[in-house]
Amino acid sequence: MDQISDLLRAQIHDTVDRIRHLGGGVAFEDFPDAGGEDAMRGDEGDLSSRREESERSLSVRRALIEKANQLAEALERVRRGEYGLCQECGEPIASARLRAIPEATACVLCQDRQERRIS
């Protein structure tokens, strides 16, 4: 279990680094109206591109935060001795699945059922 804990901690660290790399501050250029009349004269294409990039960045940041939370929850399951057990059926999750998705909470069969219910 120490190897699993180390792997989860490393992935949490990498995910948090990626979140930090994206930055959390708001750039003044994200709000061109705040600069007065001069800022309004910018090219609308540039403004649209900046807004799209900002939206993509926010989406990526949200996904990374969610992943970091899932990894932290997996680390907690390791601590409680519940790691690797499907939270739906209680059966062990295949080790290949856990290697690919260490934060997995469901076996392949239960995950498939969950996704079908959502669709």
Image: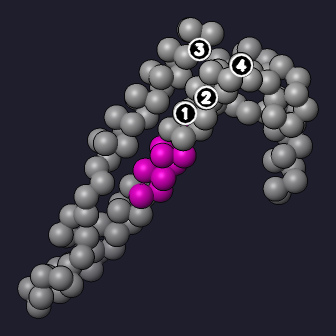
The question of residue 117 being in magenta is answered with: no
The residue tagged with tag 2: helix, strand or loop?
A: helix
- Are the residues flagged by discs 2 and 1 in contact, CB closer than 8 Å? yes
CA distance separating discs 3 and 1: 12 Å
Mark 4 or mark 2: name the one nearer the start of the chain.
Answer: 2
Task: Answer few, some or many: residues within 10 Å of disc 1's Cα (few below 14, many 20 plus, some between 14 and 19).
Answer: some
Q: Are marks 4 and 3 in contact (CB under 8 Å)?
A: no
**Closer to the eye: label 2 or 3:** 2
Of 50 and 65, which appears nearest the observer?
65
Q: Are marks 2 and 3 in contact (CB under 8 Å)?
A: no
- Residue at image coords 68%, 23%: 80
Q: Nearer the viewer, mark 2 or mark 1?
A: 2
59 within the magenta span: yes
Q: Are marks 3 and 1 in contact (CB under 8 Å)?
A: no
Depicted 51 relative to depicted 97: above or below: below
Residue 100 appears in the figure: no
Q: Residues within 10 Å of mark 2 (few under 14, many from 20)?
A: some
Residue 81 marker: 4
Horizontal side, residue 54 vs residue 27: left or right:
right
Kindly identify which residue carries mark 3.
Answer: 4
Where is mark 2, residue-wise?
A: 76
Return the residue at label 1.
Answer: 72
Tell me if mark 4 has few (under 14), some (14-19) or many (20+) residues whose alpha carbon lies within 10 angstroms of its own: few
Q: CA distance from mark 2 to mark 1?
A: 6 Å
**Cα distance in 3D space between marks 4 and 3:** 12 Å
